[in-house]
Amino acid sequence: MLRFIKNSSVFLLLFITSLNLTAQPISASVDTRRKFDYFFYEAMNAKAQKRYDNAFDLLQYCNSLDSTNAEVNFQLANFYSLLDKNDKAMNLYHKAMNLNNKNYYYNLSYGNICLDAKQYSDAIEIFTRLINAYPNNSELYVLLSNSYRLDGNLHKAIDTLNKLEAIIGLNEKISLQKFQLYNLINQEDKAFDEIKKYIKKYPTEIKYQILLGNLYLQAGKPKEAFLTYSRAKAYDPEDPYLIISMAEYYENTDNKTAAESELHTALISPKMDIDTKLTILAQYVSTLQENNKDTKSVNALFDTLITQHPQEPELNLMYGNLLMIQDRKYEARFQYQIYADANPTSPVGWEQLLMTAFPDSVDYCIDICKKALTYIPEGPQFYFYLGIGEFLKKEYKPALESLKMAAKYADKNNSKFISDIYGQQGDIYYQINCKDSAYQAYDKGLQYNPLNFGIMNNYSYYLSLEKKNLDMAEKMSSQIVKAEPSNATYLDTYGWVLFQRGDYTFAKIYIEKALRYKEDGGEKLSAEILSHYGDVLFKTGDKEKALEYWEKALEQEKNEDKTEQKNLKSLEKKIENKTYIEE
């Protein structure tokens, strides 16, 4: 039995009404014919009821009774296409078409699959034949033009679109395709003529003037762009899209003052509603980012708008987002707080405030989550971050309770989030020495997301410390190292797992890599990784250097929080005895 996944490219074809089968010859006995009709009817009934496994099996049986039936070949081809078995699907579409070459859908499906398979000449032949049979079907002209384009025959691609335009009249999508094709064959004047046709037909429609100006600007023709925008401005100087285009023009011509003036005039206009102003600002910021331009000039525009519309918290939210882009976290926090106070039952403001809290202020993070939960008592994200904050403060019991509440209210379809919740629970259980519960939590987390690297790393490391299930630990750890070969934490874990398995040479290679990546990244080396390297040096025969790294580890251990000084005595013994001591 097979399991099918919906595929939009062939979804419609699965529901095409079956043709009259009795009109097609069946070279079999009357009894076989009856059997065929019965099972085909059952197959179509099963498909209509979305019992696709049954439908597929029944169609295969029908094909065994009569392999010359076009509709059965076609229906089976649809299923093989859904299964991404395109070679089988192509053969069956081709067979169905040959058995009934006048059927529109058989030809169309074969043409489409030829196009997907880059068999452009075959696709061109099929779509040309279909156009001769259905000269008013606009879809076929688009497919034929696309086939010519992909086959490199751009002139014929344009000719085909011209024929379509003669049938359906002016169409913006067709004209833009022709604009692109003319540019590809270096016929720039004809490309721009495609857009000018609309301006000639609709002289007061400002959107075509703006489009032409934008295309001139993209083509590096700023003078032509400015003249076009100026003509558009005579019709409607307050059109928001024109304002954005004019501002972009001034940015591109290094006239920042004029760009800001253009926007400022629009934003203080009482004729323009606040939603339009927000749209203008958002698009302008997006344009600046795309062009790698400084966004700080927009801050004054936000200040103007906020003064003008003090009761529009959406402005504060957007301004906060801009300030975060500029790495002005504390100023962004002020704007987010205004939004959260105005919309306390919306999670957005509280979530943005959390972005300003991590990793600097655990207490502030906890405070935000508790406030958010008074308004949104079933918000799993706030229980989750509350649990993380409590965990970082070593308040393990309340942290576990918070994470359990997060799991309770989490969307069951959000498997990655649920996996992270159980991963955090596992970390807490290990810290309070409930190791079996920790491993159970990790297992549950991996059920929801088998590629949760955070869980896999911690799980592997803790198993290595316990010297348990080292094969499993090695498998998980090697998987994440392959995925992220420059992650120093993952490299150190993998090296330590190999050390515990007795693979000292390879352990040394990976721990050395971890040290190098940490140092290259400007990270402080922890006592733990320094101690690991000392151990592996000792095991690989470099006892003098091992002692050097144990001493470095001891010095670092003494500088760490007293509650984190887990290996102090062990390091002191190693240094005193100048030998490795198993922990």
Image (spheres, rainbow, N blue to C red):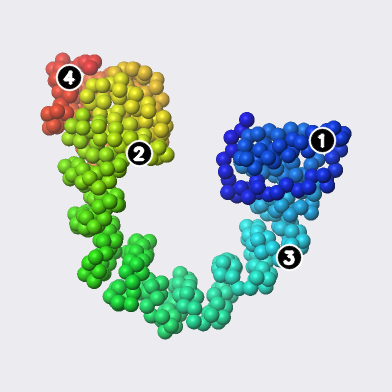
Question: Toward which corner of the image does residue 309 lie, by quadrant?
Answer: bottom left
Residue depth check, mark 2 versus mark 4: number of the one nearer the observer = 2
Residue 315: percent from the left, percent from the top? 27, 63
Residue depicted at x 82% and y 35%: 34
Q: Relative to the observer, which residue lies in front, 172 or 155?
A: 172
Q: CA distance from mark 4 to mark 3?
A: 86 Å
Residue where numbered disc 3 is placed: 135
Query: In this rendering, would 259 be left or right of 135?
Result: left
The kind of secondary structure element at disc 4 is helix
Disc number placed over residue 34 in the picture, else none = 1
Residue 537 appears in the picture as rendered = no
Residue found at x 37% / y 23%: 473
Measured Cα–Cα span from mark 1 to mark 3: 39 Å
Dots 1, 2 in contact, CB < 8 A: no
Q: Which tag, 1 or 2, sits closer to the chain's start? A: 1
Q: Position of residue 488 (x, y in %)?
A: 30, 35
Q: Earlier in the sequence, mark 2 or mark 3?
A: 3
Camera-nearest label, 2 or 3: 2
Per the model, the C-alpha gap separating discs 2 and 4 is 43 Å
Amino acid type shown at disc 1? Arg
Dots 1, 3 in contact, CB < 8 A: no
Dot 2 corresponds to which residue?
A: 410
Secondary structure state at the residue bearing disc 1: helix
The reply to whether dot 2 and dot 3 touch (C-beta < 8 Å) is: no
Q: 271 and 235: which one is in front? A: 271
Name the residue at the bottom extreme.
234
In the displayed structure, 222 sits above or below 471; it is: below
Q: Amino acid at mark 2?
A: Ala
**Residue shown at the point (16%, 28%) measured from the top left:** 564
Q: Nearer the viewer, mark 1 or mark 2?
A: 1
Query: Residue at label 4?
Result: 570
